[in-house]
Amino acid sequence: MSFLQLAESIKHRIIEYRRHLHQFPELSFNEFQTADFVADILEENNIEVLRNVAETGVVGLIKGDTPGRTIALRADMDALPIQEQTNLKFSSKNPGVMHACGHDFHTSILLGAAILLNQHRHLINGTIKLIFQPGEEKLTGAKKMIEKGVLTNPDVDAIVALHCWPDLPAGKIGIRKGPITAAAVFIEITIHGKAGHAAHPHKCVDPIVIAGQVVSTLQTVISREVAPTDPAVLTIGKINGGTAPNVIPSSVQLSGMIRTVSPDLQKRMPDIINRVVTKTAESMNGEAEVSYTMATPPLISDDSMVELIDRVVTETLGEDSLVYLENPSLGSEDFSFYAEQVPGVLFRLGTHNESEASKLSLHHAGVLFEEDALTTGVSVMCEAAVHYLNSETKTRSGNV
Ligand code: NI
């Protein structure tokens, strides 16, 4: 039986896991029940488990019957601070928290893959490490897991992850060589003015007006200073300033994110933004400071790992199931930290069906995910792991 057929045979269980996780979503680093749920299922299936890795992470280990390399399969477990509006009968029971990024899919798919791979240890030459990661939405979970040694003992030789993708129909797998998600940098801007009475602006320096000008001028950074062929986004997502309608405050805080794909542009952006922000503030008699915090590097898949997914999908699901994505997403994914350390690939799992709600974007309160995609995900994860581990052994013994 193929792993796709095996996945179909346990589809009801995978759907059950997914619906349970969907009903009880938890925010980043609060995945306590989720982690217990995951670890309990692994233990029930006699899989070696490490709990509380980087707070709420879980790591499972499946040793094949013959020794070999180690491949890691990673799922993220956290949900988002969104009030669900799907009307599903298994909608979130945790007010204001929703699995709107499909991490309930990722987790239940990896559980399904773990069960099947563990039942087929006789086919496995090497070790499969199951990484159930917390805190992806905060873009810090992967880094913490790596700091806790998740890529060592045994040393991980390669890593695979998937992410739900409403742009593709269920049954399709999307891959891309090179960058697939962007680098993300948080920016914090403080604009200093001079406080005073709202009736006497000429005796003050109004940081609210300066902030308005700064936000507008920043819009010209991408449109006028970056090549149209070089993808980049600059968004100010938060403004904080002022206490009363009749008071000019002394300062205003702005925060936002810069997303870039090319390393060269990533390097240039701070200089451009510093210039625009400080000169705009100065021209209006104020002052400004800007600080940057790196969130994630771009996620760059390893060519040979992309080829592995290409081969697995073509051989097991058929050529029609494979889509090469033309452009990277300007979203970010902390899987990039693993992919910086070991050859890695993240593939997109198509999740839309006929319904309009399944074509909404990730992080939308009404987005639906087609559950038929669950078995596709399980199958590709299992096949990728087995193909990777077994091809190496064959090469070593000279059987190829
Ligand atoms: Ni996500």
Image (cartoon, grey):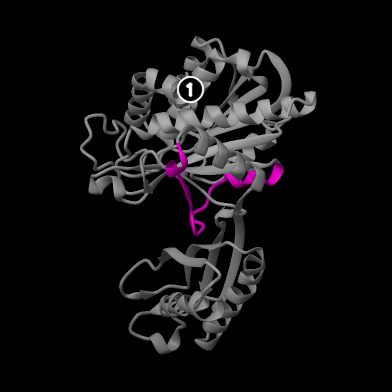
The part of the chain drawn in magenta is 318-341
Q: Residue at x 53, y 69 (%)?
A: 190
Query: What element does badge 1 sit on?
Result: loop
Task: Pinpoint residue 310: horizontal percent, then vertical percent.
Answer: 55, 42
Q: Residue at x 63, y 24 (%)?
A: 128
Q: Is residue 366 visible?
A: no
Task: Pinpoint residue 295: horizontal percent, then vertical percent.
Answer: 58, 53
Task: Pinpoint residue 204: horizontal percent, then vertical percent.
Answer: 45, 83
Determine the image quadrant of residue 103. Answer: top left
Q: Is residue 238 above or below residue 321?
A: below
Task: Pinpoint residue 30: horizontal percent, then vertical percent.
Answer: 47, 32
User: Which residue bears the numbered disc 1?
Assistant: 2
Determine the image quadrant of residue 238. Answer: bottom left
Left or right of 70? Residue 204 is left
Quadrant position of the C terminus in the picture: top right
Left or right of 280? Residue 360 is left
Determine the image quadrant of residue 215. Answer: bottom left
Label 1 CB less than 8 angstroms from ligand 1: no
Q: Is residue 16 above or below residue 180?
A: above
Residue type marked 1: Ser
Q: Is residue 391 visible?
A: yes
Left or right of 344? Residue 324 is left
Packing grade of label 1 (10 A; few <14, some 14-19, many >=20) is few
